Amino acid sequence: MLDILLIEDNIDLANTFIDYLDLQDINVDYAPNAEIALNLVQEHDYQCLVLDINLPGINGYQFCHKVRSLGKDVSILMVTAKDQLQDKLEGFDAGADDFLVKPVALEELVARVKVLANRKSGQVKTLKFGTMVMDFNAHQCTVNGQVVNLTPTGWKIIEVLLRKAPDTVSRSEVENFLWGDSLPNSNSLKVHLHKLRQALEQVNNCDIQLETVPNYGLRLNQLS
């Protein structure tokens, strides 16, 4: 079952969406405003956010910016009465992945939610775990505010681990992210992991550790 968050201040419309989505085996949490939604986003791992733009207080654009600044790569579907190109461009710039214009066909809402829920957003600008921050705009990774000198492969390893942190990522998933079907020799990943650990060791008081989970994969761990 998919888990999504609906952010919509019109309670009647929200109930219509919730009732229909529930019939499609989609579990819906509900927030009437962005402040409540931000708390829920930080507490739960949703597969998609369905977001109105015209919200009281923090509007949909501002909410998107805040979600992306937290490093959340959840997909965001904006549902809005605004249908001008500039409105959509502003939404994409804020971090939205897709748009639906009101009035909404419920079948299309479900179809778009299902498509978005099956992929991570490409709009995320930063990834965070503990004191580690990966800034895609600056192409820079820091721990405790100090730059980690990563090789291109080291960057990709950290990226795939940050997207799942603190969960473990299988070795095969890491290798597929790095090389796809063109796998190098069996020692290549081991060599890159050694270089990555050396880069982390250069950071003063580094509290992020790259751990190997025997017979499975890798994960990032924050030292207490």
Image (cartoon, rainbow, N blue to C red):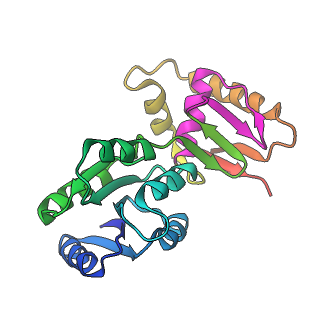
Q: Residue at x 38, y 75 (%)?
A: 30
Q: Residue at x 81, y 42 (%)?
A: 206
Q: Is residue 40 above or below residue 92?
A: below
Residue 132's image quarter?
A: top right
Residue 60 x %, y %:
41, 59
* Residue found at the very far right of the displayed protein: 204
Q: Which residues are magenta?
A: 137-163
Count of labels shown?
0
Residue 27 x %, y %:
31, 72
- For the C terminus, the image quarter is bottom right
Residue 179 x %, y %:
45, 24
In screen coordinates, is 31 left or right of 109? right
Q: Is residue 223 above or below residue 14?
A: above
Q: Is residue 110 above or below residue 15?
A: above
In screen coordinates, is 134 left or right of 93? right
Residue 44 visible, this orientation: yes
Along the viewing direction, whichever of 111 and 189 lies nearer the viewer: 111
In screen coordinates, is 63 left or right of 112? right
Q: Residue at x 35, y 65 (%)?
A: 4
Residue 29 x %, y %:
38, 74
- For the N terminus, the image quarter is bottom left
